[in-house]
Amino acid sequence: MKCNKTLQVTTLETIKNHKTGTSQPPPKSKPGPREARNIGPASLGRLRRADWTGDPHFDEDCYPLIYRHTGGVPRQINTLCSRLLLFGFLEKLHALTASSVEKVAGDLREEIAVVTAPSAPADPVGGSESIAQISQRLGLLEESVHKQGLVIKRALEIAAHYFREERA
């Protein structure tokens, strides 16, 4: 009975406050850019929730660079950090440094530039591309194939290690 009275009083007060305009719900807001000083703690907190054990370690000098390259926008922070962790995995790094952030951010910037570059009308003969352009495209393709090969090789190493431990 006491619970019902408390509920009734709370409900009546809520209705009264709403009717008189003295209590307003908090405005709904979208998450905005993070402040530079919050990048590290927020990123590490999310990693810990995903069972991160501290390897690879993020050097303190990474966070200002992550902020500089993302403007503090959470989605861009996630993208950069995901790629940074993939880079660390592929390169077998146990510490991510400022140079790692710069490398990955540069790679992302180049990829986005390729995707957002205006496309020229297709030339069925292929005579509109210069040798330098073809050479550049070939270099990018070879680098991409090399990276994919590293990913596949590392995945096979992990699978082999897993199956070896299963038998033991």
Image (tube, rainbow, N blue to C red):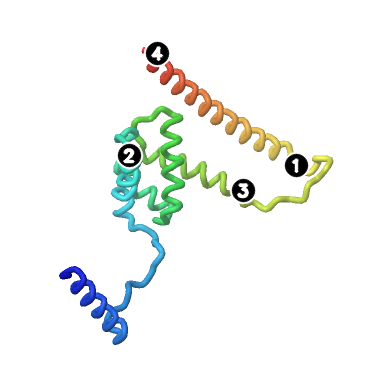
Instruction: Kindly report the distance in space between the C-alpha atoms of the residues bearing marks 3 and 1.
Output: 18 Å
> Do the numbered discs 2 and 4 sit on residues whose CB atoms are within 8 Å?
no
Of callouts 2 and 4, the N-terminal one: 2
- Residue drawn at x 41%, y 27% is 92
Report the side of 86 relative to 8 (left or right): right
Q: Give residue 167's mark.
A: 4
Name the front one of labels 1 and 4. 4
Where residue 161 appears, x then y in whole percent?
A: 42, 19
Give the residue at mark 1: 129
Q: Quadrant of the N terminus?
A: bottom left
27 in relation to 109, above or below = below
Name the front one of labels 1 and 2. 2
Question: At label 2, which amino acid type do we have?
Answer: Phe
> Do the numbered discs 3 and 4 sit on residues whose CB atoms are within 8 Å?
no
Where residue 102 appears, x then y in whole percent?
A: 43, 42
Question: At label 1, which amino acid type do we have?
Answer: Glu
Furthest residue toward bottom: 20
Q: Quadrant of the C terminus?
A: top left
Q: Secondary structure at mark 4?
A: helix
How would you rate the neighbour count of disc 2 (Cα within 10 Å): few for under 14, some for 14-19, many for 20 or more?
A: many
Instruction: Kindly report the distance in space between the C-alpha atoms of the residues bearing marks 2 and 4.
Output: 35 Å
142 or 165, which lies in front?
Answer: 165
Q: Give residue 115's mark.
A: 3
Give the residue at mark 2: 58
Q: Secondary structure at mark 2?
A: strand
Instruction: Kindly report the distance in space between the C-alpha atoms of the residues bearing marks 1 and 4.
Output: 55 Å
How would you rate the neighbour count of disc 3 (Cα within 10 Å): few for under 14, some for 14-19, many for 20 or more?
A: few
Of callouts 3 and 4, the N-terminal one: 3
Question: At label 4, which amino acid type do we have?
Answer: Arg
Of callouts 3 and 1, the N-terminal one: 3
62 in relation to 139, above or below = below
Of callouts 1 and 4, the N-terminal one: 1
